[in-house]
Image: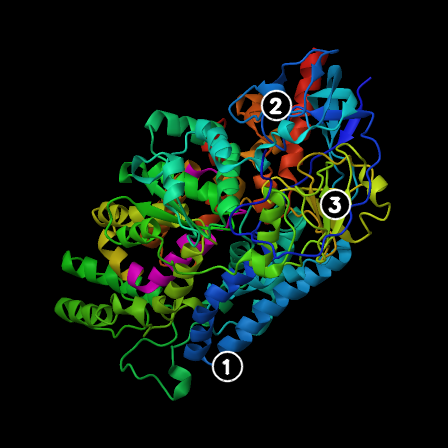
Amino acid sequence: MAAEIHLLGPVPLLRRPARTGSLMWRVVLALLPAALLGVAAYGPEAAWMLGACLSGAWLMEVLAGGLRGRSTQKDGSAVLTGLLLALTLPPGLAPGWAFLGGVLAILLGKQVFGGLGRNPLNPALLGRLLLALLAPGALESGLRQPFGWQGGSWLTGAPGAADPLRLFWETRRVLDQALAGLTPRLPADWPQGLDRLDLIQHAQDILSQAGPGQVLWARLPGLLGEVSILALLPGLVWLFTARLVDWRVPAAGLVFLPVGFLLASSGAGGHWLPLALGLRGTSLLLVLCVLASDPVTSPLGQGAKFLFGLLVAAAALLALQLSPQAGGLFWVLLPANLLTPWLDRLLLPGGPR
Amino acid sequence: MLNLRPRRGLALPHRELEAWPALPAPPSRLLLPLRHSRLDQSEPVVRPGQRVAAGEPLSLPLGLAARVVCSPLAGRVRRVDVLSVVHPPLRDGSPRGALPVPCVELDELSAPSLEERTDWQQLERPALLERLRPWGLTGAEGLPLDLELELLSGEARLLVLGVAPAQALQDALLEQVPAALARAVTALCRLHGFRELLLACPPVHSEARRRWLALLEPILPARCVVLRQGHPWDQPRLAALALGRPLPSPRRPLAAQGLLALTLDQLAALELRLSTGLPLPPLVCQLDDLPEPHGLPQPRSCRVLRAWPGTPLSELDPALPQPGEWLVAGLPLEGSPLLEGGTPLLPGHTLLSRLPRLKSPEAEEACIHCGQCLDICPMRLAPIRLVRLAGEERLEEARGLGLEHCVHCGLCSWICPSRVELEDGLRRARQRLREARHGG
């Protein structure tokens, strides 16, 4: 008969590894400058929107934790979800909708699947998608002129609070058709009775307001997290150097971007892409470095991570090229999330190499 | 005759001698698993009925990651059998899996003479180097390791370790014996009190260097620094070493603490606590009858328990361990928590530290797919995937993905931010796989 001896156990080691909660809170810390700059740029309205997203997500997490008999709000994941949701929303969105977005993100994005670690889709993006379905008008009308609250726009001739992405899309179409010798159908707010040369001049005047400088410092209305890419970069650099976020997904995406840009530029609507990138560049970085790198909804294997990054970057470029919708950039990540298990089955390394 | 006093970094102040308590007779039987810590098993080389001297090998390594298991006492081999090793329960109290391990049971035990003691942890430096050399370690610039160590003055705090004898050998070492190598390097660091470890790797071995660093950094108290051979920045450091000049980051000498350290693992644990600020160990368990004057005086800083190997912990002190405390034995790399009073004390359990459990047991959370278990696995497995496959009863698929290559080092469980008990899951999976095959 086999005797039993009690012998082994886990090994006490010197370093205490990071825990899920500390990882989440550190990502929150890294994104905080971008959120604070957004509040500074858009004023009290943005602060209300941010607060509503955070409180909606946090209260839903507390409620779900109470129902499950297990408190999970301290792990920071709900706050991170609320913060990410706020960064991808227009700053002037009514607090009620923002609160609902936070609640839906946690409830339908995470808790219905069993909580953190079991959600197949990114909760913040699912929350944004649901808001766009429930209240498309509220999202559209929530855009504000950055720094406008401090006493009027200092950029004369800037478009109002309309979505500049849609505005530039329309202008680009008018310009293309006018240059091709066709008679374009004009947007409603354009002056009537312009001849072809006037149309081209007017379109070029509008398009000249966009440019790569928009990524560095927003002059046109945008989302809360899009005020400046400079507010996002230090936090991202910290996340990568501290190995809090895996570098493979963003690296694959960022390496692909120039290639993808060249490929897409030669296609239909390709000359529209630089304008779209100038407006949504900061959001694209947020998608690649944070949202697509979310470990729960991205693949586990290293090769699969690279492929996932490529797919997301390609889909994001395609969305920017094809659609004037501000949210299109974010929606492409949701189907990519659904591909994650398949990518892992395909590419996750197995045995010892 | 062997001098058993630790040599370097520890010059104990003379203390008033106190009488040791008398030991009862040696234990009647002793059960020795032929597998040290989490390394590979070793193959028994003794037969039932055979008499063995203290220090005589009972087994020889079955794989590169195994170690020779020697008899701690003189005695007779009663049986050689495969026994079930049961592990301490999980944090929530639920039982864990067991693995069959070949064991040797000894009886008719008697105390060894001093000359018979061959525990490598008590060896003189030449003998220790003789043991370490087969691991393939060399000194910097191709020097033999012993020559390299001779270059180090008493004040030196650097170990210069060359890991480039031959690419093929190095690859084999990194692939197959990472835990054993780390252990050997740890022992060297402990022995000499090194605060920095320089890995001397030619640039072509950058991948090997990265893996060495990834392997050693989390577990060594010493700081790992890569020495780029021929790089101008590192030459002054080598010169300082060779000339015995003082180097940066001087360490507070252990002697100033006036502590007792009988063996290397005790020294190691003491240094761990000094360097990390953990409380000093209040208990030292001496598992032999080391007589005066070869033993050390009874210290005032800690309590010494004396017993024979195999004695259950509860016989030494029924109050150990107290509720809410964690009793840890052995080197930091190998140390195992002794959770139950019935745990037999074995060589290696010579130092017992009572650590308070600062927090309530941490609950396991859902995996967040961070992939850190894949990155840290020395066998380059995908632990979370193997555990999931086993959970879905796809054991053969898990076997095809390397389940049986797991060395149960526990690093995956340690690194997991969600505290998933991966190593235990792998252990259970292997057990089920074995049962399934046996049943088939």
Query: Pointer 1 indicates a residue of which chain?
Result: A
Q: Residue at x 29, y 49 (%)?
A: A257
Amino acid type indicated by mark 3: Arg
Specify whether B84 is left or right of A161.
right
Look at label 2 and name its amino acid.
Gln
Q: A21 or A84: nearer the eye? A: A21
**Residue A306 vs residue B122, the one in the foreground:** B122
**Left or right: B26, with A30 as reference point:** right
Residue at 63 percent across and 62 percent down: it is A103
User: Is residue A300 in sight in this rendering?
Assistant: no
Above or below B200: residue B389: above
Distance, label 3 to label 1, CA atoms, is: 48 Å
Measured Cα–Cα span from mark 2 to mark 1: 67 Å
Q: Is residue A272 visible?
A: yes
Q: To which quarter of the image does residue A67 belong? A: bottom right
Query: In the rendered image, which residue does mark 3 sit on?
Result: B91
User: Which quadrant holds the C terminus of chain A?
Assistant: top left
Q: Residues within 10 Å of mark 2 (few under 14, many from 20)?
A: many
Labels 3, 2: front one = 2
- Of B172 and B419, the residue lying toward us: B172
**Percent x, y for residue B191?**
52, 44
Asked if both marks, 3 and 1, belong to the same chain, the answer given is no
Local secondary structure at mark 1 = helix
Q: Which residues are magenta?
A: A277-302
The CA distance from mark 3 to mark 2 is 27 Å
Which chain is mark 3 on? B
Examine the residues drawn in magenta and state their main secondary structure.
helix
